[in-house]
Amino acid sequence: MGTAIATCVVTTAREGRVLVVTIDNPPVNALGVAVRQGLWAAIEQAEQDASVDAILLLGEGKTFIAGADIREFGKPPQAPLLPDVCNRIEASPKLVIAALHGAALGGGLEVALAAHYRLGLPAAKLGLPEVNLGLLPGAGGTQRTPRLIGVQAAAELMLTGRHMGAKEALQVGLLDQLDEGPEVLTAGLAYANALLAQKAPVRRSRDAGALINQAASQAALKVLKAETAKKARGLFSPLKILEAIQGAIDLPFDEGLKQERALFLQCLDSPQRAGLIHAFFAEREVAKVPEAKAAAPRPFAHIAVIGGGTMGAGITVAALDAGLQVTMIERDAESIARGQAHIEKVYDGLIAKGRLTAQAKATIMARYQPSTSYDDLHDVDLVIEAVFEDLEVKKAVFKELDRVCKPGAVLATNTSYLDIDAIAAATQRPQDVVGLHFFSPANIMKLLEIVVPSKAQADVVATAFALAQKMKKTPVRAGVCDGFIGNRIMAVYRQAADYLMEDGASPYQIDEALRTFGYPMGLFQVVDLAGGDIGWAARKRRAPTRNPQARYVEISDRLCERGWFGQKTGRGFYLYPEGARAGLPDPEVLAIVDAERARKGITPRQFSADEIIRRYMAAMINEGAKVVQEGIALRPLDVDVTFLSGYGFPRFRGGPMKYADMVGLDQVLADIREFAQEDPLFWKPAALLETLVAQGVDFDSLNHRE
Ligand code: 3HC
Ligand code: NAI
């Protein structure tokens, strides 16, 4: 290498006629202000040096550039702005080449698109994922991408936010050349020198011609607009993306860029951007728990799953997919055969869809051993129990595990509600017991509550977090209580919904309000999907300890008594005529609701969608605050991630606690106090909420305590 000038995060070095510009801003080379300044200076340096003919842009570490620095959003912008940096790169009279060996995302891809030529290595991933953050590509991406690859392909990239592999990028024309690598510097220099040798011209994406057929571009965009308006479900930025692309078709390049900037700023100002970016960081923060920082995980290459029912089978598939060896234990030959059939059904479904080969299934299944004998567990590293939700049955299983498992094996339970301290106490090794609460279907749902009983050792908790990472789950640390974080809070807002129903709102009206709020399904649709019998069993279990003073709505029990458990029985809150998955309103359910109101002497009243949401959310937030206050959740963000990844909470609202911050905690508290006038027992404000309001701070202030 020739002489090197360092500007800290961007370094330049001469290599013959090429100026190599390396971005080194760990962990992902985000385009913070220092990087933008460094890039600007590097281009200037190249232009002033007559002996430089080409500029090669590279990223240090695993990524090219992962995009704008998300932490800067919401703060005052600092020059040079990224769109200006991109324009500066594109305008350079010297040949600019970007060499992509890893992720080139958002602003990172926009920098590459501003270069004159793009080289990819096999691990390159190209994407414009701004939509996932409530934004649109704001550094020329909405203008350059359609000019390079056409409206359809560009819009698909921006609307889905997906990452495109190097081969496909070459095919569609985002990359000009592929190199097998492995060295990005060597490959980049070879490409740059080859271009110089060919006297390749400076070639600007702004002049690329994929939009030349106006009529075809307009027609494609019209279809996309209609489809997106239907699918956007309250989301703001997808429609703005299409507006910006419209500008790429209709306006000269510089005008299109101006319009893109204006639309980008609208997105930046939207509460959806704040919610989505909170979700992005919260999902990364949840895994940072004291135990995972303090202790190294134990090994867990070979695990056992006890029970091959709904959950056991799903957990087994998740573990097999993560490359683990799994022994499944069931009670008898018939049950183990049923368990295996559940697992094979998942893989056969993938084969039918062409997403797996029979050979790959055989390779996966080679890591699976069925058994009916606990003695086969003497060598396993970790056990996940998923038998019936019955404390005595679980205690018996754990006694057996204590007898057969090797010392140091981690013993986990998938219980939904039961006291894990009591389960741990059934063994001689409570320090090795932890809760691993998966959600159904366990091979698909991202959320994994890691429930930490009082005696659990730090390395057991660390092992649980490492397992979650291996299984690509989103882990949330929870303390022991009835229902942990998610189901405990759900039980309370479910009650609020039941009160609304008994007081005058129909279940269909409540579900409609929730869908409009952004949920993919309403609460009563979810009850029907999960099976009404599950909640019924929990209510019966809690009946002996229920406060007789507390209001109790019996409508769901009336449905369950009739055997109306939801989709699986063909009716629940909704009717499911043969084969139909979406439910139809059921007049008989409304009659039952009416009868219950009459029995209790309640005169139904009208509820607006707004009041439904205010009550539903106030109940959720208030219980969320109690969960944080009691230390069941470490931080408000743990509650947010639980609901985002396990309960369908609309991502653009950031989670219930972030939503509360955006509404204003004083407003939420005022609502709770107003509702408390009808029912002070149910609507008792959380002490934490009162304290935060008194201090004038929000939930987010608790997310950043060390
Ligand atoms: N800005 C700031 N920090 C970022 C970041 C970004 N763009 N992308 C990732 N990070 C941080 C993460 O918060 C995390 O920090 P932590 O270690 O303190 O928790 C760290 O980088 C590593 O990230 P991951 O844990 O996600 O690492 P992975 O290796 O799993 O994934 C990735 C890497 C694929 C690059 C992933 O981080 C990612 O998808 N990042 C976001 C990409 C993105 O959305 N870019 C668009 C930004 S918006 C934009 O560019 C606007 C422009 O059009 C003007
Ligand atoms: P399930 O009834 O489908 O399966 C339980 C299985 O355990 C049955 O196949 C049964 O044969 C087996 N089993 C019972 N006793 C056993 C023993 N001593 N040894 C070996 N196998 C035994 O139940 P499901 O739904 O899979 O639930 C299992 C556990 O997961 C429960 O604790 C439940 O609360 C929890 N859970 C359930 C969720 C759901 O949505 N179904 C979600 C999250 C947790």
Image (spheres, helix red, strand yellow):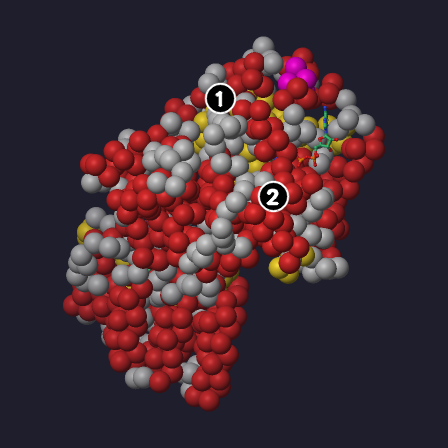
The residue indicated by pointer 2 is: 556
Label 2 CB sits under 8 Å from any ligand 2 atom: no
Badge 1 marks a residue whose secondary structure is: loop
Residue found 24% across the figure and 65% down from its top:
85
Q: Look at the image and say whether residue 326 sits in the magenta stretch.
A: no
The span picked out in magenta is 395-399
Q: Pinpoint residue 580: horizontal percent, then vertical percent.
A: 69, 60
Q: Is residue 12 above or below residue 410?
A: below
Relative depth, front residue between 645 and 15: 645
The quadrant of the image that shows the C terminus is top left
Query: Is residue 177 placed above or below 606 in the rendered structure?
Result: below
- Above or below, comparing residue 407 to residue 230 in the picture: above
- The residue singled out by tag 1 in the image is 453
- Closer to the camera in the image, 393 or 684: 684
In the picture provided, is 128 more to the left or to the right than 341?
A: left
Please give the count of numbered marks on the rendered protein. Answer: 2
Q: Nearer the viewer, mark 2 or mark 1?
A: 2
Residue 234 x/y as whole percent: 42, 63
* Residue 396 inside the magenta-drawn segment: yes
Residue 321's spot in the image, x, y percent?
Answer: 62, 42
Distance between the alpha carbons at the discs numbered 2 and 1: 32 Å
